[in-house]
């Protein structure tokens, strides 16, 4: 008697991750009703949750609708685990330190930033925001815990937990209970070894042009490139510029170092709170609080210097130079007979400023003493300070630093 072929049977296949089970129905297999499918599932010990019972019912209806047809039908589905989500800082627009550095690097490499069309003054548009005291710069999003999953057999699937949030902020930022980060001082956000903080200095790796916009910063600014026509660099601290400065506005509350020169086409201005230096200045209006040093030439400039002009290798041709103190130059005037005005001695405008500064000095010193006295008292207390005391000390120290910053230029 010949061997009879094995009867065609339906079977259940489970995915490698055990998150899905399918009923495989070969062509010509005997039809299965709902109870038969449940029996097969029970043989494999599948967990038939209410949702899976609905899948079984739908599979039975599909088989009844097309008897004898081949089919693969989902009859059980698990739930994958939801892994924990790591914490991060959601920065407010324009404050993300990594985005700022990316934009600056792109600008230095000649990558143009997209600009919205319309009547927009692109000179005044900046690629990032400088932080002001009290600004909400971002929010800490704390790590989210994972959610347990289940496979089609009912076994628990353990999620991966998110790593703890380990970064910190220093006393330049206030970390609120809800995760908000509030600026305690002006500057720009920066990631450092100790975490997130506000720095009072910024470096622009390329030129100041349309890719960057005007710079108005409460601290010090370093520009590795130059400054193009009609742009402004205004800083309360020092300004250092490596490249050529065109017809621009440069203003500093402290010192200015121009490693190249400035050719301003009679449209540029240079205002320096303390001391300044440059290789050359051409067609610039200049005001210097203390000393000015020029290496090569001063051509057709109008310059006011509060103390001394130092230019042992410098030739001055055209324009006017007024200095309250000594003037050292290599040559004055030109063979072409260009008029060059030199005035030495008292400068009324600067004398008035100096008088105001001298009157302000004792007021600022008294203010500093007012902050230092309680700060020294708190420092003298031995042992570990309470959080409120630490907060008070940080506030007093910031007040001392701010006052000393006002005294320093005087």
Image (spheres, grey):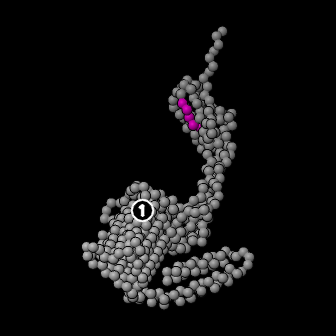
Where residue 31 sits: x, y (%)?
Answer: 58, 28
- Identify the residue at image location x=49%, y=83%: 410
Give above or below for 346 relative to 315.
below
Where residue 127 sits: x, y (%)?
Answer: 43, 63
> Where on the picture, by quarter, is residue 344?
bottom left
Left or right placement of residue 86 versus residue 99 in this view: right
Secondary structure character of the magenta stretch overall: strand
**Number of numbered tags placed on the structure image:** 1
Left or right placement of residue 325 versus residue 399 in this view: left
Is residue 252 or residue 188 the one in the foreground? 252
402 in the magenta segment: no
> Where on the picture, by quarter, is residue 313?
bottom left
Give above or below for 293 relative to 242.
below
Of all residues, the one furthest to the right in this rendering is 383
Q: Which region is colored magenta?
A: 71-76
Is residue 63 or residue 129 the one in the foreground? 129
Which quadrant of the figure contains the N terminus? Answer: top right
Q: Which residue is mark 1?
A: 225
Q: Is residue 213 visible?
A: no
Where residue 210 sits: x, y (%)?
Answer: 37, 62
Q: Is residue 389 visible?
A: yes
Where residue 104 sits: x, y (%)?
Answer: 45, 60
> Where on the picture, by quarter, is residue 144?
bottom right
């Amino acid at each position: 008697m010949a061997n009879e072929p094995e009867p065609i049977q339906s079977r259940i296949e489970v995915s490698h991750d055990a998150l899905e089970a399918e009923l495989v129905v070969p062509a010509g297999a005997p039809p299965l009703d709902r109870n038969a499918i449940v029996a097969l599932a029970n043989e494999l010990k599948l967990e038939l949750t209410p949702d899976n019972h609905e899948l079984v019912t739908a599979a039975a209806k599909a088989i009844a609708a097309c008897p004898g047809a081949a089919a693969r039908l989902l009859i059980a589905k698990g739930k994958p685990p939801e892994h924990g989500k790591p914490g991060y800082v959601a920065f407010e627009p324009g404050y993300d330190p990594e985005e700022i550095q990316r934009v600056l690097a792109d600008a230095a490499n000649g990558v143009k930033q997209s600009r919205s069309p319309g009547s927009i003054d692109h000179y005044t548009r900046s690629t990032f925001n400088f932080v002001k005291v009290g600004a909400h710069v971002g929010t800490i999003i704390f790590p989210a815990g994972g959610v347990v999953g289940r496979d089609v057999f009912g076994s628990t699937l353990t999620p991966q937990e998110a790593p703890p949030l380990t970064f910190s902020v220093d006393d330049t930022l206030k970390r609120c209970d809800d995760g908000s980060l509030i600026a305690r001082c002006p500057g720009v956000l920066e990631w450092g070894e100790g975490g997130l903080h506000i720095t009072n200095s910024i470096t622009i790796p390329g030129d100041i042009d349309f890719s960057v916009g005007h710079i108005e910063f409460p601290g010090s600014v370093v520009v590795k490139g130059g400054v193009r026509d009609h742009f402004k660099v205004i800083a309360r601290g020092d300004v250092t510029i490596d490249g050529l400065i065109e017809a621009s506005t440069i203003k500093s509350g402290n010192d200015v170092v121009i490693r190249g020169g400035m050719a301003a086409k009679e449209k540029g201005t240079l205002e320096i709170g303390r001391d300044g230096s440059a290789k050359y200045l051409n067609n610039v209006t200049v005001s210097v609080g203390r000393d000015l040093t020029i290496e090569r030439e001063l051509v057709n400039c109008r310059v006011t210097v509060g103390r001394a002009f130092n230019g042992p290798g410098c030739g001055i041709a055209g324009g006017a130079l007024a200095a309250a103190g000594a003037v050292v130059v290599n040559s004055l005037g030109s063979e072409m007979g260009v008029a060059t005005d030199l005035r030495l001695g008292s400068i009324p405008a600067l004398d008035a400023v100096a008088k105001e500064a001298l009157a302000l000095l004792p007021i600022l010193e008294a203010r500093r003493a007012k902050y230092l006295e309680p700060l020294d008292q708190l420092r003298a207390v031995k042992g570990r300070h309470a959080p409120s005391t630490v907060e008070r000390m940080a506030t007093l120290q910031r007040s001392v630093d701010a006052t000393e910053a006002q005294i320093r230029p005087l």
